[in-house]
């Protein structure tokens, strides 16, 4: 059985990696040093601490909620769970576009009006994942509106990891280990520094990772911004991305997270 992720230990490793002390972090977050030290010692975090802490660390608040094992507030969830299928195609096709067109697609997503959330906006299968490192990372993708199938397809395009959706499900349940290779690939798509994700999950990397490729940066941005789309908007954007791409889908993959 996979051991639950120790959020306090992960936070300590992240601060060590960034050479950041408790008073500095507390000052950036507008928190007391005693609150930060309590988190590092294993105290249960709450929303009032996690939101400012995420801002101070340059992380998405939803990611810190997930890593801390705290229920994500509805306001931080993806707009429409039904948009997830199209979101994966936005990334798969968008990442193969030239840089200028990727930015055009990204700006188009950002320009669309925010729609009301449907009643079933929560990501699917949130209870299926373990509290271990693999489960927490897979849940981060669920909060980016990616199903296990969507995750498998996107990573097959972006990275050398060519795993089945069921294998990612096993990683989420803690039955398959979260490896350094997967940390590199997951970090690329999450838009998180690989060494930061290594620190937060406790999965050590054997060597410093390469600098993120521009395609990886844009893929992560496209996936993140697509969270705000309704299902109808996501379908429209996916159609636009497909029309902009000249070569057939699945023509080749882009190794954006290092060999």
Image (cartoon, rainbow, N blue to C red):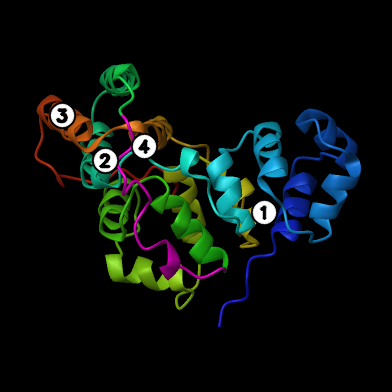
Q: Earlier in the sequence, mark 1 or mark 3?
A: 1
Question: How far apart, in angstroms, are the residues tagged by discs 1 and 2?
Answer: 28 Å
Whether 110 is drawn above or below 205: the answer is: above
Q: Is residue 105 one of those drawn in magenta?
A: no
Q: Earlier in the sequence, mark 4 or mark 3?
A: 4
Q: Earlier in the sequence, mark 2 or mark 3?
A: 2
Q: Would you name the residue on which mark 1 appears?
A: 199
Residue 227's tag is 4
Does the magenta stretch mainly form a helix, a strand or a loop? loop
**How busy is the neighbourhood of tag 1: few (under 14 within 10 Å), some, or many (20 plus)?**
many
Q: Is residue 124 one of those drawn in magenta?
A: yes
Whether 231 is drawn above or below 8: the answer is: above
Under circle 2, the secondary element is: helix
Q: Which residues are magenta?
A: 116-131
Q: Would you name the residue on which mark 3 appears?
A: 236
The reply to whether residue 200 is visible in this rendering is yes
Q: Position of residue 140 (x, y in %)?
A: 47, 51
Question: How far apart, in angstroms, are the residues tagged by discs 4 and 3?
Answer: 14 Å
Q: Earlier in the sequence, mark 1 or mark 2?
A: 2
Point 33% across, 37% down: residue: 117
Q: Are marks 2 and 4 in contact (CB under 8 Å)?
A: yes
Location of residue 80 (image quadrant): top left
Q: Is residue 60 left or right of residue 257?
A: right
Q: Are marks 1 and 3 in contact (CB under 8 Å)?
A: no
Q: Is residue 81 left or right of residue 85?
A: right
The reply to whether residue 205 is visible in this rendering is no
Q: Are marks 1 and 2 in contact (CB under 8 Å)?
A: no
Whether 242 is drawn above or below 62: the answer is: above
Question: How far apart, in angstroms, are the residues tagged by discs 2 and 3?
Answer: 10 Å
Whether 192 is drawn above or below 184: the answer is: above
Give 77 or 26, whichever is nearer the viewer. Answer: 77
Q: Would you name the residue on which mark 2 appears?
A: 87
């Amino acid at each position: 059985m996979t051991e639950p992720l120790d959020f306090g230990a992960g936070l300590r490793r992240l601060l060590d990696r960034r050479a950041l002390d408790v008073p500095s972090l507390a000052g950036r977050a507008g928190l007391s040093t005693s609150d930060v030290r309590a988190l590092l010692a294993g105290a249960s975090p709450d929303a009032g601490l996690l939101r400012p802490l995420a801002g101070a660390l340059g992380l998405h608040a939803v990611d810190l909620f997930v890593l801390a094992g705290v229920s994500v507030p509805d306001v931080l969830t993806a707009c429409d769970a039904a948009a997830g299928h199209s979101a994966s195609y936005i990334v798969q096709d968008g990442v193969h576009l030239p840089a200028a067109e990727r930015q055009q697609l990204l700006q188009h997503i950002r320009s669309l009006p925010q729609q009301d959330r449907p009643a079933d906006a929560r990501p699917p299968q949130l209870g299926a994942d373990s509290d271990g490192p693999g489960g927490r990372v897979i849940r981060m993708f669920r909060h980016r509106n990616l199903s296990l199938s969507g995750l498998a397809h996107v990573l097959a395009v972006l990275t050398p990891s060519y795993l089945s959706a069921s294998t990612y499900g096993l990683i989420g349940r803690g039955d398959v280990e979260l490896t350094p290779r997967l940390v590199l690939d997951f970090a690329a798509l999450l838009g998180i520094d690989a060494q930061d994700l290594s620190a937060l999950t406790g999965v050590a990397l054997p060597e410093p990772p390469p600098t993120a490729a521009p395609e990886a940066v844009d893929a992560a941005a496209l996936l993140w911004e697509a969270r705000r789309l309704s299902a109808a908007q996501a379908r429209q954007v996916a159609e636009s991305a497909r029309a902009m791409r000249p070569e057939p889908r699945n023509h080749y993959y882009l190794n954006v997270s290092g060999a």
